[in-house]
Image (tube, rainbow, N blue to C red):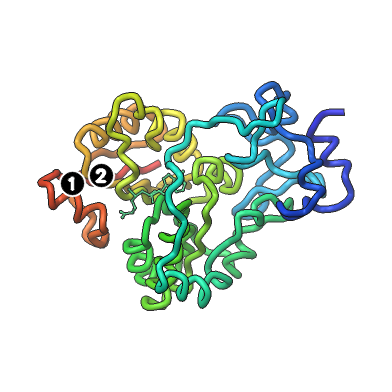
Amino acid sequence: MSGVSARAASSTPRPALSHPRWRRAPRLTATSSVAERGCEGVFAKPVEVVRIGGTYRSPVPDAVPPARPHLKFTDDGRRMREVLSYSRRGNRFTPAQQEAWDAHHEKWVIPDEAVDHPDFSLAAWFGREAPLVVEIGSGIGEATAVLAAQRPEVDVLAFEVWRPGVAHTLGLLAEAGAENVRLISVDAVWSMEHLIAPGSLDELWTFFPDPWPKSKHHKRRLVTPSFAALASSRLRPGGSWRLATDWAHYAEQMQEVLDAEPTLSGGVVERWADRPVTKFERKGLAVDRVITDLRYTR
Ligand SMILES: C[S@@+](CC[C@H](N)C(=O)[O-])C[C@H]1O[C@@H](n2cnc3c(N)ncnc32)[C@H](O)[C@@H]1O
């Protein structure tokens, strides 16, 4: 029996991470079969997972999506090394962040473990069906809160793995009265593949993604040919990907990669007037870097 069908045969939903059954669940390894891993590479669709509404669901009642980053293990039980577009930073909250977290996380934060559930549904977490915008790397939420509050008719799903940034964002969302945002701290690359259905995004925002300036780290940059193909596949026809960066080399890479993606058209544009100046833009401007905005449409 393959890994997927073995999991599918189980009659109870996948337990929370802390549950002892999780530790007994089959671990995905570098040598796991495609069926066990559930997908092969960024282009492939997850096995036995279909689009229902705006999200993926399994047609097999208890099948689970492939393991998220940080949850894949080698045969001898070590955590598998993965090339990710972020590094782990301190997770300590300031008193203001703690206050914002305590007051608002239940309303606006989707817990990581929720995405493992076979019935995960974005519509359920937003409490409605609405055009979907994804922001990758929302940082402390300066752009998220302003842009979402200006667009109450859309749902904004903001990916940010840095918890203090998420907590800070909660305070800004409360101030702005932006009810239409949900924050999630799961890797956005994995999530775009496994949680966002093809053709379901109105817009994708990537403002000041980590530049990874050293050449040996360029492979960690978010905007790569494989991610561009994935991101484009998630946009609806006519949907846009808006990007901004203060790193000239990364701007060139973005343009080169996105120009080469056959399903996208666009290029460098005037600064998006709606986009608020964020901490990273301020930092770039303070050292005289040129800010480049790009917009590509599917
Ligand atoms: C340089 S900051 C920019 C933050 C914000 N957009 C701004 O303009 O101030 C990039 C952020 O992206 C987050 N990030 C990078 N890769 C990510 C991923 N794959 N999934 C979720 N968040 C990610 C990092 O944690 C970091 O906070």
- Quarter holding residue 48: top right
User: Visible in this render: residue 202?
Assistant: no
For residue 226, side relative to residue 4 (left or right): left
Q: Is residue 207 left or right of residue 67?
A: left
The image quarter in which residue 295 lies: top left
Tell me where residue 19 appears, x and y as whole percent: 77, 53
Above or below, comparing residue 30 to residue 273 in the picture: above
State the quadrant of the C terminus: top left
Mark before the other along the chain sequence, 1 or 2: 2
**The image quarter in which residue 164 lies:** bottom left
**Relative depth, front residue between 285 and 57:** 285
Residue at the image position 53 percent from the left and 57 percent from the top? 184
Residue under label 1, please give it: 291
In the depicted structure, whether residue 262 falls above or below residue 69: above
Q: Secondary structure at mark 2?
A: strand
Q: Amino acid at mark 2?
A: Thr
Badge 1 crowding class, 10 Å Cα cut-off, few under 14, some 14 to 19, many 20 or more, is some
Q: Are marks 1 and 2 in contact (CB under 8 Å)?
A: yes
Using the image, determine if residue 164 lies above or below residue 229: below
Q: Residue furthest left?
A: 288
Question: Residue 293 at what x, y percent from top left?
Answer: 23, 46
Q: Position of residue 27 (x, y in %)?
A: 74, 34
Under tag 1, what secondary structure? Answer: loop
Residue 184 visible in rendering: yes
Q: Total of numbered circles in the picture?
A: 2
C-alpha span from label 1 to label 2: 6 Å
Disc 1 residue type? Ile
Question: In the image, is 238 to the left or to the right of 3?
Answer: left
* Tag 2 residue: 245
Q: Residue at x 74, y 30 (%)?
A: 36
Image quarter (top left, top right, bottom left or bottom right) of the N terminus: top right
Query: Can you give x and y, in whole percent of width and height, for residue 170 in the image?
Result: 44, 70
